[in-house]
Image (tube, rainbow, N blue to C red):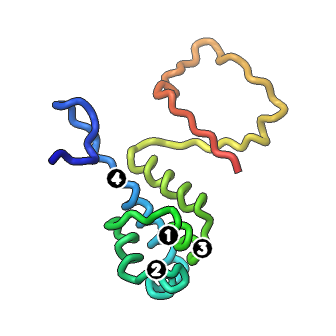
Amino acid sequence: MPDPVTIGPRGRKQPERPLLRTLLGDVLRRNRQKQGRTLGDVARAAKVSMPYLSEVERGRKEASSEVLAAICDALRLDLSDVLAEVTHNLAGGQGRRTAVIELGSFRSRRASPPARGVSSSAHASGDVQLLAA
């Protein structure tokens, strides 16, 4: 059976990508440990079994959206913050850089065309991320 992580035409080696459940589990565990809390404490607060929470943290199980919300509530974390941390870890793991620009500083400015001789190769990938808080 083919590896579910490898996607693309045959014969072309795709870069190995981490699984979302692994990245999510890492973020949950790191935050739990940062708070100095035990698996049992968080599992009771989230109303899930301790072995199940352990498997979620190790990336062995994929939590449903309801269970994930309960775990985030138990950790007193916003789901959006957890997902943002996962996104940051995923982008960093692929060697990509994410630039954060505060939009407030640009509201009164007008866009201008690039100066002559300025290479656009720095933005050749075409990836754009907009984060608004």
Element marked by disc 1? helix
Indicate the position of residue 99 as horizontal and vertical percent values. 58, 42
* Disc number for residue 67: 1
Left or right of 14? Residue 28 is: right
The alpha-carbon separation of the residues under discs 4 and 1 comes to 21 Å
Left or right of 76? Residue 17 is: left
Element marked by disc 2? loop
Indicate the position of residue 62 as horizontal and vertical percent values. 39, 63
Left or right of 49? Residue 82 is: right
Comes first in the chain, label 4 or label 1: 4
Residue sitting at x 51%, y 32%: 127
Residue sitting at x 32%, y 67%: 60
Instruction: Name the residue beneath numbered marker 2.
Output: 48
Element marked by disc 3? helix
Verify CB contact (< 8 Å) between mark 1 and mark 3.
no
The alpha-carbon separation of the residues under discs 3 and 4 comes to 25 Å
Q: Is residue 66 above or below residue 75?
A: above
Instruction: Name the quadrant containing residue 55.
Output: bottom left
Res 122 visible:
no
Element marked by disc 4? loop
- The amino acid marked with disc number 2 is Val
Mark 4 or mark 1, whichever is nearer to me: 1
Which is nearer the eye, 6 or 123? 6
Instruction: Name the residue beneath numbered marker 3.
Output: 73
Residue sitting at x 43%, y 50%: 90
- The amino acid marked with disc number 1 is Val
Indicate the position of residue 33 as horizontal and vertical percent values. 48, 78
Instruction: Name the residue beneath numbered marker 4.
Output: 18
Verify CB contact (< 8 Å) between mark 4 and mark 1.
no
- The amino acid marked with disc number 4 is Pro
Q: Residues within 10 Å of mark 1 (few under 14, many from 20)?
A: some
